[in-house]
Image (cartoon, rainbow, N blue to C red):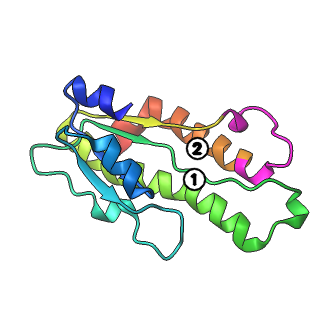
């Protein structure tokens, strides 16, 4: 997706936990890559490292952070529940909010949220993951109609 958007002239900032894949995705195209991720509560959130240049905000944010956990909810630890909600929902919403402020200020930009079919269908043994992805879909639906006016 990043290669196709870059070839179409979009300015991209990429973020990912896997630095090898991030470098491969960047290729020779003019886009910035920021290693790291939102997978642990102690890591610095990507939003804090993303500072669009004045007059040149990013055109598009594509985000799809996600970790899962399969099993019975009663078998999950509290930290597993917290981590899934933090990564799959909270870190994504914080990143979108951070960059949306720049995009609204510049009068341009797009946000693409990559969710999961688990957010709309019951996925056996993935209740918390499904709930986080359903919540992300709700955020996308609401922002689609009024984020530009309220950001």
Q: Earlier in the sequence, mark 1 or mark 2?
A: 1
Looking at the image, the residue that sits furthest to the top is 8
Q: How many angstroms separate mark 1 from mark 2 (CA)? A: 6 Å
Does the segment drawn in magenta span residue 124? yes
Q: Tell me residue 90's x, y (percent).
A: 54, 58
Between 80 and 35, which is closer to the camera in this rendering? 35
Q: Are marks 1 and 2 in contact (CB under 8 Å)?
A: yes
In the picture, the disc for residue 135 is none
Residue under pointer 1: 89
- The N terminus, quarter of image: top left
Residue under pointer 2: 136
Looking at the image, residue 80 lies above or below residue 101? below
Q: Tell me residue 16's x, y (percent).
A: 41, 54
Q: Tell me residue 14's x, y (percent).
A: 33, 47
Magenta stretch in the rendered image: 117-129
> Residue 57: which quarter of the image?
top left
Left or right: residue 61 compared with residue 140: left
Between 136 and 69, which is closer to the camera in this rendering? 69
Looking at the image, the residue that sits furthest to the left is 55
Q: Which class describes the residues within 10 Å of circle 2: few (<14), some (14-19), or many (20+)?
A: many
> Residue 24: which quarter of the image?
top left
Q: Residue at x 19, y 51 (%)?
A: 52
Left or right: residue 47 compared with residue 51: right
Between 21 and 10, which is closer to the camera in this rendering? 21
Q: Tell me residue 44's x, y (percent).
A: 40, 71
Q: Which class describes the residues within 10 Å of circle 1: few (<14), some (14-19), or many (20+)?
A: many
Element at badge 1? helix
Element at badge 2? helix
Q: Residue at x 23, y 22 (%)?
A: 8
């Amino acid at each position: 997706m990043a290669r196709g958007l870059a070839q179409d002239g979009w300015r991209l900032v990429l973020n990912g936990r896997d630095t090898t894949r991030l470098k491969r995705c960047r290729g020779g195209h003019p886009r910035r890559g920021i290693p790291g991720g939102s997978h642990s509560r102690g890591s610095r959130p990507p939003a804090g490292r993303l500072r669009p240049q004045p007059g040149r905000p990013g055109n598009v944010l594509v985000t799809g952070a996600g970790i899962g956990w399969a099993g019975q909810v009663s078998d999950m630890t509290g930290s597993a529940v917290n981590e899934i909600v933090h990564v799959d929902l909270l870190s994504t919403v914080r990143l979108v909010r951070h960059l949306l402020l720049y995009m609204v200020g510049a009068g341009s930009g797009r946000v693409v949220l990559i969710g999961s079919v688990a957010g709309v269908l019951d996925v056996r043994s993935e209740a918390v993951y499904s709930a986080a992805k359903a919540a992300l879909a709700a955020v996308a639906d609401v922002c689609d109609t009024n984020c530009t006016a309220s950001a």
